[in-house]
Amino acid sequence: MADLASKLGGDVAAIMVTNPNTCGLFERDILEISRLTHAAGAYFYCDGANFNAIVGRVRPGDLGVDAMHINLHKTFSTPHGGGGPGAGPVVLSEALAPFAPAPWVVHDADGYRLIEREEDEAAQAFGRLCAFQGQMGMYTRALSYMMSHGSDGLRQVAEDAVLNANYIKARLSDLMSAAFPDGPCMHEALFDDEWLKGTEVTTLDFAKAMIDEGFHPMTMYFPLVVHGAMLIEPTETESKQELDRFIHAMRALAEAAKAGDVDRFKGAPFHAPMKRLDETRAARSPVLRWTAPEGSNIAAE
Ligand SMILES: *Cc1c(COP(=O)(O)O)cnc(C)c1O
């Protein structure tokens, strides 16, 4: 906090905080952070990436947030990965709302109205969005998700997501090293690779062996501040039975690693059509069109 306070000054326009953060921890000093930020004449942007952990429980405005994007693909059920389509509506505090780009929707006695022009009610708008509708299908899906849950259901989403992550953390912490062992986590259980020391098995090897067990590996090596990170985010949708199946597989793998069964990991995945990919090359020189090898009828991956 002292470090933050020393950096806030006349040349700071805004700060950005992810809360809960990528280590699965809730920033408890958030009210003091927003107070200091506002006192310095700056605004507080919140990365809404981990809203899943607090949706229905906490109003970002009450934390002093001035602007936040809501990752619909993380909190509100729209598809994740595969390059889209995505949508991230941005919500603003009263202090910033007058500057929102037009058009926007208002609700008053006559029902809903669209404020279209940068005049009158939108005189301070900083411009006009040309693609206002965004990915319409994503909004429809998110709205359906919210309405099917209701406010009590959305609150339970956060509670179940956090409970599921803590269940995993509690059931694996005796074999694997939790990065932040003290106290509960939010909706992400984070382990480091301390527990793999001396086994020759790396986080990558472990993740590849999970594929052989039929599980999509968790996020690896992220966040960067945790060595060999394994970030497990079960979300609210997994049942206790499914969590137990996952925990059982993880425990069996962890015990195999500790017992020195290195081959099971170094050669993994054994049961996937593609083995270890050259991910750097895939990112640097993506092949975006599949062409059939001459005289072959092998299906595209
Ligand atoms: C997922 C994530 C992002 C990226 O958001 P996308 O909308 O998926 O691109 C940024 N920050 C954090 C902490 C995240 O978890």
Image (tube, rainbow, N blue to C red):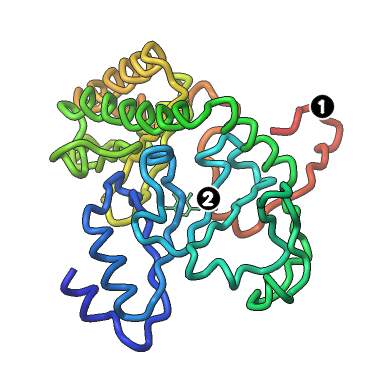
How would you rate the neighbour count of disc 2 (Cα within 10 Å): few for under 14, some for 14-19, many for 20 or more? many
Q: Residue furthest front?
A: 109
* Residue where numbered disc 2 is placed: 70
Determine the residue positioned at 41% across, 56% down: 61
Compared with 101, 267 (above or below) is above
Horizontal and vertical percent position of residue 59:
40, 48
Compared with 218, 34 (above or below) is below
Compared with 90, 112 (above or below) is above
Where disc 2 sits, the SS reads: loop
Horizontal and vertical percent position of residue 85:
69, 46
How many numbered markers are drawn?
2
Q: Quadrant of residue 260?
A: top left
Label for residue 297? 1
Could you tell me which quadrant the N terminus lies in?
A: bottom left
Q: Nearer the viewer, residue 123 or 126?
A: 123
Determine the residue positioned at 43% across, 29% down: 157
Q: CA distance from mark 1 to mark 2?
A: 44 Å
Where disc 1 sits, the SS reads: loop
Determine the residue positioned at 31% across, 40% down: 202
Determine the residue positioned at 52% across, 61% down: 92
Residue type, label 1: Asn
